[in-house]
Image (spheres, rainbow, N blue to C red):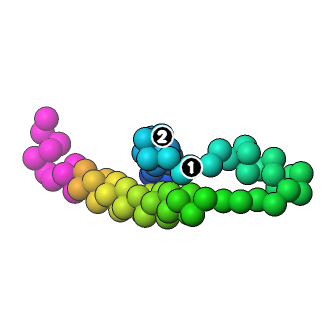
Amino acid sequence: MLGTSLIGSYVTMRGISLYAGGWQNESVIVNQIKSGAAVTIDPAFYGYLAGILAMTIIAYVVQLKMFKRMEEHEKHPYNRLN
């Protein structure tokens, strides 16, 4: 569940960044670090990272609640009659 929350949050933020701008390509940042060049990161990039973190936590909690609700439904005695 944590994996799907993280991947979904990342993909959502990447989609938003295509319209809003400010996302820096990860490979460019890695190449700058490897070459020893000064890495300049747009402040909006940190906002996207915070958004990914917040969305991951929210999506994980939602999935936990949904999974718990499904388990409670399957424990009901009338559910076994179907």
x 27%, y 54%: residue = 66
Work out whether residue 9 or residue 41 is closer to the camera in this orientation and state it: 41
- Residue 15 at x, y percent in the picture: 45, 41
Residue 65's x, y, as percent? 29, 60
| The residue stretch that appears in magenta | 71-82
Verify CB contact (< 8 Å) between mark 1 and mark 2.
yes
Residue 69 visible to the viewer: yes
Mark 2, Cα crowd under 10 Å, few <14 / some 14-19 / many 20+, is few
- Residue nearest the viewer, comparing 1 with 28: 28
- Up the image or down, 20 lies above or below 61; here it is above
Residue ID at (73%, 51%): 29
Estimate the x, y position of residue 5 in percent, counting from the top left.
Answer: 45, 51
| Residue identifier under label 2 | 18
Q: Residue furthest top?
A: 82
Looking at the image, which residue sits at the far right? 35
Up/down of 7 relative to 57, above or below: above
Dot 1 or dot 2: first in sequence order is 2
Q: Residue at x 10, y 47 (%)?
A: 78
Instruction: Report whether residue 12 is seen.
Output: no
Q: Amino acid at mark 1?
A: Trp
Residue 73 drawn in magenta? yes
- Near-viewer residue (53 or 38): 38
Instruction: Identify the amino acid type marked 2.
Output: Leu
Tag 1, which secondary structure? loop
Q: Is residue 69 left or right of residue 57?
A: left
Residue pointed to by mark 1: 23
Residue 3 locus on image (x, y percent): 51, 50
Which residue occupies the foreground of this view, 39 or 10? 39
